[in-house]
Image: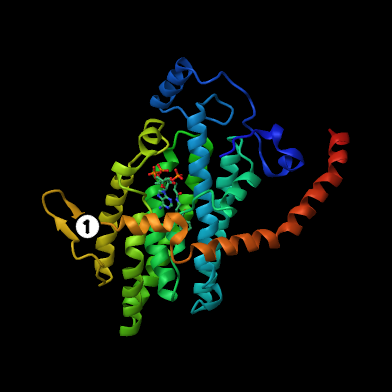
Amino acid sequence: MGLSGAGGLGHISPMYSQALNTATGPADSSEAAQRFQERIDAEERVEPNDWMPEAYRRTLIRQISQHAHSEIVGMLPEGNWITRAPTLRRKAALLAKVQDEGGHGLYLYAAAETLGASREELVEQLLTGRAKYSSIFNYPTLNWADIGAIGWLVDGAAIMNQIPLCRCSYGPYARAMIRICKEESFHQRQGFEIMTTLARGSPEQKAMAQDALNRWWWPSLMMFGPPDSASQHSDASMRWKIKRFTNDSLRRKFVDATVPQGHYLGLTFPDPALHFNEATGHWDFGEIDWEEFRRVLAGEGPCNRERLAARRRAHDDGAWVREAALAYADKHRPAERAAA
Ligand code: BYC
């Protein structure tokens, strides 16, 4: 992953990079790293021009950009249903939700740019398949109930994972997450409301809700990432307070919060091992198919190719907008200088 500052990005950088973090501070030394860790331990926020270890910067660029890509790719499965929403009210809500996701992607790309990564470079990593995005968006939306299940389960999982990110040690990411979480909470409610309507509707509608839950349950649990024993980044990210909880602990919280909601809807979960453990006070659940997770991350999920093809097409179709914006910026640059 490239980490160039504004200086090396050619004529495009003024437009695509906020380029805040261009200062070259002290090289990583154990003393500097120790001082940095003390700041983290004291719950101080790290800001763009502060010194930070290269590995901290790289971890944040990786996580924030992959989070941004997830928002942008996440628009595709739902966008697929905007024209087929059953009522005008449902259409307006879905349209607003998908627009929110575009906005989340933009805040997150902007946060990654404060670490010296350029937008162009990050987008290129997505389009060439070098950067990951959330596994969940490689599954298809087959019918309207899937829009309910995505809001309820996928946004519900996203909130569970993202609320702690509002306390992430890196200021711009933490602040972006506050607004994102508020909007995600609206998304979760619109999804649960769709599920409630279907679950209380005709037998066919209830069957649609059940079928959507059956298909989205396990992929939602995979959103939290590999088990703690296989999570390569968790230790460092927890030490730096980028992550506040491990993958398994957030997954467990999600299951505990969501199973009673499904039962309230009169639905069942596609997991014969799911049961309430009186001794621990948690819902125990069955084994996740980590082989399926691995396949989806390797690009072999049901919709990986379709999603990337759609993003590449959108990028190509937008080339004229980028060119026009650059031409406009070039045209106005001398006037800005004269006025300064
Ligand atoms: N999908 O060491 P680990 C949303 C990768 S929802 C794909 O545990 P980390 C939305 C991981 O990147 C989703 N890849 O990593 C909702 C790493 O590979 P690399 C977006 C995954 O970073 C509704 C490797 O596996 N949310 O936004 O400590 C509508 C090892 O994992 C996944 C975020 O991105 C996965 N599910 O923990 C629209 C939240 N899980 O990078 C949009 C921010 C793991 O070494 N991100 N991998 O090649 C995070 O909280 C953390 O990055 C994760 C993973 C918990 C996801």
Quarter holding residue 14: top right
Residue lying at 56% horizontally and 52% vertically, measured from the top left? 126
Tell me: residue 200, above or below residue 316.
below
Q: x, y percentage for residue 249?
A: 29, 45
Q: Does the residue labelled 1 lie within 8 Å of ligand 1?
A: no
Q: Which amino acid does label 1 sit on?
A: Phe
Label total for image: 1
Tell me: residue 29, above or below residue 268.
above
Residue that protrudes farthest toward the left in the picture: 279
Residue lying at 28% horizontally and 63% vertically, measured from the top left? 261
Tell me: residue 340, above or below residue 175.
above
Question: Which residue is nearer to you in this view: 235 or 163?
Answer: 235
User: Is residue 123 at all visible to an observer of this figure?
Assistant: yes
User: Is 186 left or right of 65, judged from the image as shown?
Assistant: left
Question: Which residue is nearer to you in this view: 229 or 18?
Answer: 229
Q: Name the residue under label 1.
A: 285
Q: x, y percentage for residue 329?
A: 80, 46
Tell me: residue 174, above or below residue 53.
below
Badge 1: residue crowd in 10 Å (few <14, some 14–19, many ≥20): some
Question: Which residue is nearer to you in this view: 213 or 222?
Answer: 222
Residue lying at 77% horizontally and 52% vertically, measured from the top left? 325
